[in-house]
Image (tube, helix red, strand yellow):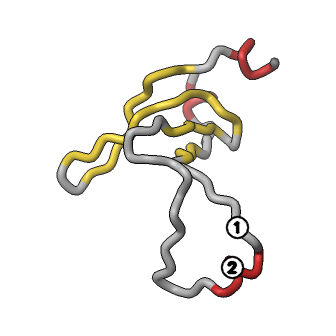
Amino acid sequence: MTTINGVEIELSVVIGNRTMPINHLLRMGRGAVIELESSITDEVEILANMVPIGRGEVVVEGDRITVEITQKYNMSDLAA
């Protein structure tokens, strides 16, 4: 078990997405705002090493932002 404790995993939370032409992206500067195709109540996708492992909800408490896991994918779900 001590070997597994040393394994690092990159966790990512996808809060939304946006499709735009590359020329718009290249014109953006510091402070530019990208409007996402999602709302505040939408669930977020949780990724481990860029592989979807579940879904969750964003929770804001004061100056802290956390993600509450609402659904965990089974390994059989990922193979399909």
Residue depicted at x 66% and y 33%: 52
Look at the picture and state if 62 lies above or below 21.
above
The quarter of the displayed image where residue 7 is located: top right
* Residue 77, horizontal then vertical, whole percent: 72, 16
Confirm or deny contact between disc 2 and disc 1 (CB under 8 A): yes
Residue depicted at x 60% and y 46%: 10
* Residue 18, horizontal then vertical, whole percent: 63, 58
Q: Which residue is mark 2?
A: 24
Look at the picture and state if 20 lies above or below 50.
below
* Residue 30, horizontal then vertical, whole percent: 51, 85
79 horizontally vs 8: left or right: right
For label 1, count other residues whose C-alpha is less than 10 Å away and answer few (under 14), some (14-19) or many (20+). Answer: few
Q: Which residue is mark 1?
A: 20
Q: CA distance from mark 2 to mark 1?
A: 7 Å
Residue depicted at x 50% and y 80%: 32
**Tag 2 secondary structure:** helix
For label 2, count other residues whose C-alpha is less than 10 Å away and answer few (under 14), some (14-19) or many (20+). Answer: few
Residue at the farthest right position: 80
**Tag 1 secondary structure:** loop
68 horizontally vs 28: left or right: left
* Residue 36, horizontal then vertical, whole percent: 53, 57
Q: Amino acid at mark 2?
A: His
